[in-house]
């Protein structure tokens, strides 16, 4: 055997050793996850899907990552692990809306939620909203291509315990090898949004009368809330209400005092404000 062949054999043996170590560490991680699941059964903490924590984890991993592997490959490895252990703790499925470019939306969701998560595809966002509203074990993915064309958020404006919340935005990591960059979607489910350290909150203001976006933005700033009005929808019936969608570049909870101040500045025409949810700002942005 030549010296070159000996070197190759030694390197391959080292790879085999590292593969065994990787598998052993992965098995240790799974064992800890099982312990966490058992501990949760003994406590009041039943939350499994933690999009804010996942976003913090992925940001930290990619900051430390220094190999020649592309970020999307490293991300995909960890996303597969995260999604698989979530599925082990509490089985769930995902309803995906794909009005067009169905394969693209399917791949977008599969890249994030892994190969072990059951998924179904639907053309209508109404079907997805109905499924996730009646089944707390489902997450829904709805397109967010052009906010002024997307109308499904109107169905979330009533608020309440049975209405799902916006929890994440896809893609979180850019895919340089595919053609998914022009597709965006939001993940909804029956989980309380949580901050990741860099977030976007979506909120709806319901008013009796029309209010200009310029005035809304002015009063938002005056109340100490960043962001702006993305869209305003006129009533579908004569005695209906106006809906105004806001994007706020920070995590805002429902008990934030600035919301009350904002409502006071708008005046008596305010019916209510509803936090639709929040998502971690994707690394792709």
Image (cartoon, rainbow, N blue to C red):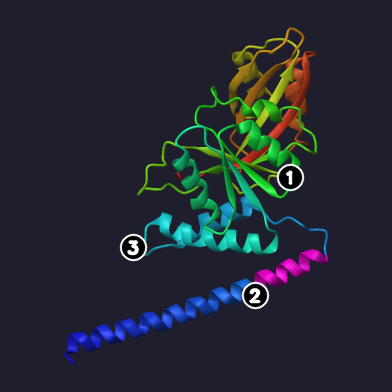
Q: Which residue is mark 3?
A: 68
Q: Is residue 224 visible?
A: no
Look at the numbered disc 1 and give the secondary structure of its residue: loop
Query: Is residue 10 depicted above or below 264 in this figure?
Result: below
Say whether residue 55 is left or right of residue 41: left
Tell me the residue at 47%/58% (across/down): 76
Q: Work out whether mark 1 precedes mark 2 in sequence or the reverse, and give the earlier one.
A: 2
Tell me the residue at 30%/87% (across/down): 10
- Image coords of residue 25 (percent x, y): 54, 76
Q: Work out whether mark 3 precedes mark 2 in sequence or the reverse, and give the earlier one.
A: 2
Look at the numbered disc 2 and give the secondary structure of its residue: helix
Q: Which residue is mark 2?
A: 31
From the image, state whether disc 3 or disc 2 is nearer to you. 2
Which of the pair 137/192 is nearer the observer?
137
Say whether residue 38 is left or right of residue 110: right
Q: Residues within 10 Å of mark 3 (few under 14, many from 20)?
A: few
Query: Is residue 111 depicted above or below 18 in this figure?
Result: above
Q: Does the segment drawn in magenta span residue 247? A: no
Query: Is residue 248 depicted above or below 92 in this figure?
Result: above
Which of the pair 151/248 is nearer the observer?
151
- Image coords of residue 77 (percent x, y): 48, 62
Which of the pair 271/125 is nearer the observer?
125
Magenta part, dominant SS: helix
Q: Which residue is mark 1?
A: 135
- Magenta segment, which residues? 32-42
Label 3 close to label 2 by CB (< 8 Å) = no
């Amino acid at each position: 055997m030549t010296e070159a062949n000996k070197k190759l054999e030694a390197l391959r043996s080292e790879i085999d050793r590292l593969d065994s170590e990787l598998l052993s560490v992965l098995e240790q991680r799974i064992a800890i996850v099982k312990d966490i699941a058992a501990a949760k059964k003994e406590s009041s903490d039943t939350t499994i899907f933690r999009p804010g924590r996942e976003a913090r984890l992925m940001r930290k991993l990619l900051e430390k990552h220094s190999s020649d592997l592309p970020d999307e490959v490293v991300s995909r490895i960890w996303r597969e692990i995260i999604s698989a252990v979530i599925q082990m703790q509490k089985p769930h499925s995902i309803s995906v809306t794909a009005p067009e470019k169905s394969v693209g939306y399917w791949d977008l969701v599969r890249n994030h939620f892994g190969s072990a998560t059951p998924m179904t595809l639907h053309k209508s966002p109404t079907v997805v909203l109905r499924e996730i509203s009646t089944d707390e074990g489902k997450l829904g993915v709805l397109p967010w291509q052009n906010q002024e064309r997307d109308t499904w958020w109107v169905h979330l404006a009533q608020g309440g315990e049975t209405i799902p919340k916006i929890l994440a935005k896809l893609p979180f990591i850019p895919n340089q090898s595919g053609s998914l960059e022009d597709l965006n979607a939001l993940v909804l489910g029956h989980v309380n949004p949580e901050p990741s350290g860099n977030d976007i909150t979506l909120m709806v203001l319901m008013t009796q009368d029309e209010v200009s976006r310029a005035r809304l933005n002015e009063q938002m700033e005056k109340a100490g809330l960043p962001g702006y009005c993305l869209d305003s929808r006129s009533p579908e019936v004569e005695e209906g209400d106006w809906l105004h969608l806001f994007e706020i570049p920070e995590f805002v909870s429902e008990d934030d005092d600035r919301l009350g101040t904002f409502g006071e500045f708008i005046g008596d025409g305010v019916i209510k404000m509803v936090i639709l949810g929040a998502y971690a700002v994707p690394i792709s942005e």
